Amino acid sequence: MKEYRVVGKGLPRIDGPEKATGKALFTVDVFLPGMLYGRILRSPYGMARIKNIDTNKALSLPGVKAIITGRDVSDVRYAFVDTPRYPADEQPLAVDKVRYIGDEVAAVVAVSEAIAEEALSLIQVEYEILPAVYTPEEAMKPGAPLIHEEHREGVSAWEEWGVAQKSSADQNNEINIPNVSSRSTVSFGNVEQGFLEADYVREDRFETAATAHCAMEPHAAVASYDPYSGKLDLWLSTMGIFLKRYVLSKALQLPISKVRVRHSYCGGAFGGKIDVFPYEFCAAYLSMKLGKPVKFELDREEVFTTTRQRHPIVINIKTGVKKDGTIVAQDIKVIADNGGYRGSGAVVVFLCHGFSFPIYTVPHYRYEGLAVYTNNPIRGPQRGHGAPQIRFAIDSQLDQISRDLGLDPIKVLLKNVRHQGDILPNGDRLNSCGLTAGIEGAAKAVQWQEKRIQFAGACDSHIKRGVGISLCAMFSGAMYYPFASAAMVKLHDDGSATLFTGAQEIGQGCYTTLAQVLAEELGIEYDDVRVVGGDTELCPIDLGSFLSGGAMITGNAVKLAAADAKAQLFSVAAEILGVQPSTLSCSNKQIFVIKDPSKTVSYAAAIQGSIYRRNGNPIIGIGSYKGNPETDRYPSLAKAKGLFTSAYGFATQAAEVEVDTLTGEVTLVKAVTFHDCGFALNKTIVEGQVQACMSMGQGQALSEEIVLEKGQVLNPSFLNYRLPISLDTPEVIDKLVETLEPNGPFGAKEVGEGAVAGMLAAVANAICDATGVRIHEMPIRAEKLLAALEEKEKAKKSS
Amino acid sequence: MKKIINTVINGKEYELALEQNRTLLEVLREELGFTETKKGCDQGECGACTVLLDGKPVSSCLVLGVNIEGKKVMTIEALATDGRLHPLQEAFINQGAIQCGFCTPGMLLVANALLNNNPHPTQVEIKEAIAGNICRCTGYVKIIEAIETVAQETKTC
């Protein structure tokens, strides 16, 4: 593999010193002179009609500056998905109906947070409680109470971006079931015929829990409106500044150029900070109303309850295989609970297909995904977005099928996985695919053969051990507003450069890896690069840090911008040296004539030369990149037609667990990931991403669950929501499978999301390997496993 | 009613007039401008707001400001001295133990307190020391490794 000067090295983060000293500015750290503080009144009911809101008493509390309710902003609608088929269904404050416990009802701004909080208790809301539904099954029953009945007027965001209005042909995809918010259907081959050809058919039902993102920085927004210039400055704890700017400018009816999202670091996101939230709108709206800076910071309970969760999903799978384990047919039905609003329901039921089909070759396939309204908290994107749920189901079942047929699961995986060069049914081409190498590597790392023999032999102890494996895939960027990324490289007189990128640093290290791409391509050192990012006024458009497109899409834009700057530099150097640019090369920031290296000019001299010779022209390189440039904008969520992404990242994950059969307690002893990210732009950062995904996957497999009772979150705190802590850290083996993706910058593609997904089935399969018990629901907490073990014992005795 | 208290923060003496219900975290962030100390949960459950009180790590959201009378407070500000990063900060940066950076100040102060009291901790002791500090970004592996490195380095000299 080619060695580069800068990319590929595990260089220290560019933002390391700022963060290690605590100086890095997060949105919660923004305090402006004269700033006011906001709090939000939330619904205590799952579903209720708002009959009246009396704010007089609250308004008369000294220090309260303004209160708004849904009536003040009743014409505003927005949502993560806002298409002709799925028009936006969220409003910043409930107008006449609340739809989940935590739904926003009123916003107060006061001189202190404590006064704002006190004012909330003085607002009198008269509710008429309505029947509510808390499971998709209840919600889809004929005659179930309808959560959304309203008809929406207006033009959806996607229509503004050029998407055609809903045609009559689209009606075919709609079904007459109450509360279904979204539906995706796909089929290829002939699934019924496929099952007839199969030697063995198995049907299973799997279920996953709602989980929380747990970003350490709570959600916050600071808005500062200047009435004289009409400009609104925003600091948002977010993953995508351009999407937020678009949605908020539309909601606030401000020209897009009058809204500026300013730079702040984001203290973790994991998918939970891309939706536009009511507190963000309210901060902006109230700052505009009062002409003063306004800050909203959610408390931890609000973060757990009202800022999105991972979709709990029920997955029914029927799979038919040949005797040797070759898959011939698969029929998948997915029902996702998207809560009181659609959130990303339409996306997750599309993505459950999107992350199902790139892994195995399945000749006959049918998929139906439904997202359903309930009166639970809203669900949105969370690291992997559908992948953990669908991979858990598919790979648990495939493992079980292997066991049923007496086959080695590793061999079954190898028989069915896709390979480089495969073309997926939607037309996506796998230009790189490290699945086979990953399976072989992970099996070796977890000592698959040896351990399976060793563990199967040890049957006396109540401590059982087992190993399991699973696979996953993730897009490297997908088509979503603003559909592409651009980058600007500004050169300085001393031969150094500044990168301007709209990418948002959320911890994933994009400033660092993008600086490496720039330095490599331009021929300067990593230390010569500074990054200006995360500001809509200063930086060119960027897809944002939420579709795993950072390395691939923004990385390519930066590479092109650096190449542009370099070409300009060579052109000036050629002029200075009196030769053609094509005769030049460079090293150590010196440009020289290839045939006569004594003829040389430094980068600094060439940059200065450009200013002297070219009428003050500084050198600024520009680059832009769009994934799937041949497609217009997007795939169809409902029909899954169109290209999804220009490269898939793949991971193979294995787990070794220890189960105490007396308590049901599971310890993850060893976790292995072989990640095919094409090429690691920064080894340390890639390892960090993979380890983080594994930890999140471990939590989702064994402990993490939002506990709900009639729509009420019962565990909205770190004490009661059990995410992994340092003591849970297993032995970790993370290796890269470098396949050099031809579309990626230096061969790089996705790394930040996929490797959550394989952990779930890897752990579940390892538990099954250890105990013979198959658990179909995530997470596998001790009480669940113990009950299953007891069940198994009972069945054994009675037989 | 405000109460006057005398305290030492990062080696500097302060005389402060504090509302009695303000937490140390609020005093640090909102009154003194030490926003380097992060507010993660305000419930004593995440460790982001950790400071050292007379050398011991505490969640500053669980300490009332008026209770620091006569005590010494150290925030992340004081870990780097004379413009030079502390070896723990260097190790965290060089070994990828920092991602979003929000838990980092608290994590570093806990690690610092650990190594001050126990310069050569075992891996288990390190894991136990940081068990009250949640990091969602790293999966802890690189944080543990970074602390181990610093402990190793001091061993050799």
Image: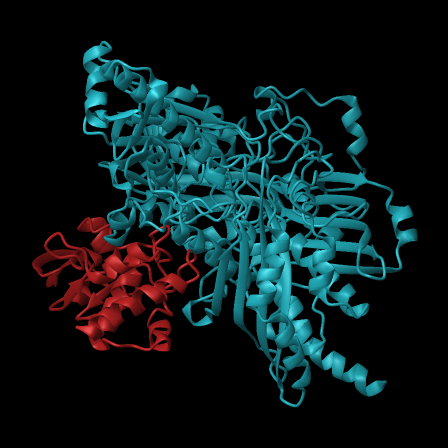
Chain colours: A cyan, B red
In this picture, is B11 found above or below A174?
below
Write the residue at 77% across / 44% down: A367
User: In which quadrant of the rendered view does residue A319 lie?
Assistant: bottom right
Where is residue B42 shown, x and y percent of the image? 35, 58
Residue at the top extreme of this rendering: A615
Instruction: Give A109 or A363, whichever is nearer the viewer.
Output: A363
Residue at the bottom extreme of this rendering: A460
User: On the rendered structure, is A17 left or right of A127?
Assistant: left
Number of numbered tags placed on the structure image: 0
In this picture, is A543 found above or below A673?
above
Q: Is residue A552 visible?
A: yes
User: On the rendered structure, is A730 left or right of B68?
Assistant: right
User: On the rendered structure, is A274 left or right of A390?
Assistant: left
Write the residue at 43% across / 67% down: A725
Where is residue A177 shown, x and y percent of the image? 79, 41
Instruction: Give A713 or A207, whichever is nearer the viewer.
Output: A207
In this picture, is B16 found above or below A740?
below
Where is residue A449 shown, x and y percent of the image? 65, 73
Q: Quadrant of the C terminus of chain A?
A: bottom right
Instruction: Give A676 or A129, whichever is nearer the viewer.
Output: A676
Write the residue at 24% across / 48% down: A23
Where is residue A396 shown, x and y percent of the image? 70, 62
